[in-house]
Image (spheres, rainbow, N blue to C red):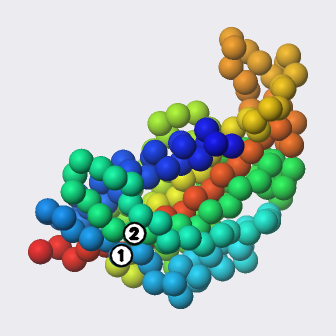
Amino acid sequence: MVANFRRITTGFGAWALIAFLLAGAAGAETAKPLAPEDCKRVRLALENRLPFGPGFRRFEVEFPKNDNNIEGRVCRLLTMGTGAHMEGYGIGSLSDMRTKVMAALNAGGWTENAETGRFSETSTPGREVFALSGNNAICVTTIVVGLVDGAIPAAIAVKDGKVMLSKIKPYQREWWISIDCFGVPASP
C-alpha cells in the first residue's frame, strides 16, 4: 500500500504544476483548496453514486515542495480498499473504475473541458489520472490498483516476472482513489 501511496502523491506534483501553468500563474501564486462545503458536496456525489465502501476521508494538504515556486493547499478526498470491497457492481477493471468515478463526479456537476483534458495520464500500468472542472475549480483524480503488500500471487498470475492483476484474487488487489480539488487562480 505504501508504494501505491507514493505513486499517488508523486503524480500530484506534476499535475499541480500543469494546473498553475494553464491558469497563467507567474511567480509564487497560491492555490486555495476547495471550500469545505464544496469539498463535502464532491465527497457526497462520490459516496452516493459509487457502489462500494468504505467512503472517502477528507483532508486538506499542502502542495508538494517543488522548484517552480508553487504554493497552496488542496482538499483531498481519499479512499482505499481491496478488490473484495471495491469490485463488483460493474467494476472489474481499472477502466471500469475510472468510468464509475467519472460518472459520479459528472452527476455532481463536474465536467471535462480542454483544460482538464491535459491532466489525463496513464503513465504506469495500474494508474489513471484525469481531471474535471466546475465553479472555477479543478478536481484531479488519481486511481491506482496494485498487489496488496505481502500477497503471494498464484503461478498463473505471473508472466515474465510481472503480476497480472486480472489473474489474482480480489482480496489480493488493492485500490487507492485520491481526488484533489483546488480553486483555479484568476488569470492576470
Which amino acid does the dot numbered 2 rest on? Arg
- Work out whether residue 72 can be spotted: yes
Indicate which disc residue 77 carries.
none
Q: Quadrant of residue 186?
A: bottom left
The residue nearer to you, when weighing 1 against 18, is 1
Return the residue at label 1.
32
Relative vertical location of residue 34 with respect to residue 7 in this rendering, above or below: below
Q: Which residue shows up at 73% across the image and 15% down it?
A: 159
Indicate which disc residue 73 carries.
2
* Residue 68, horizontal then vertical, whole percent: 22, 51
Inter-mark Cα distance, 2 to 1: 6 Å
Q: Quadrant of the N terminus?
A: top right
* Residue 57, horizontal then vertical, whole percent: 66, 70
Relative vertical location of residue 164 with respect to residue 56 in this rendering, above or below: above
Q: In what element is the residue under mark 2?
A: strand
Q: Are marks 2 and 1 in contact (CB under 8 Å)?
A: yes
Q: In what element is the residue under mark 1?
A: loop
Relative vertical location of residue 60 with respect to residue 66 in this rendering, above or below: below
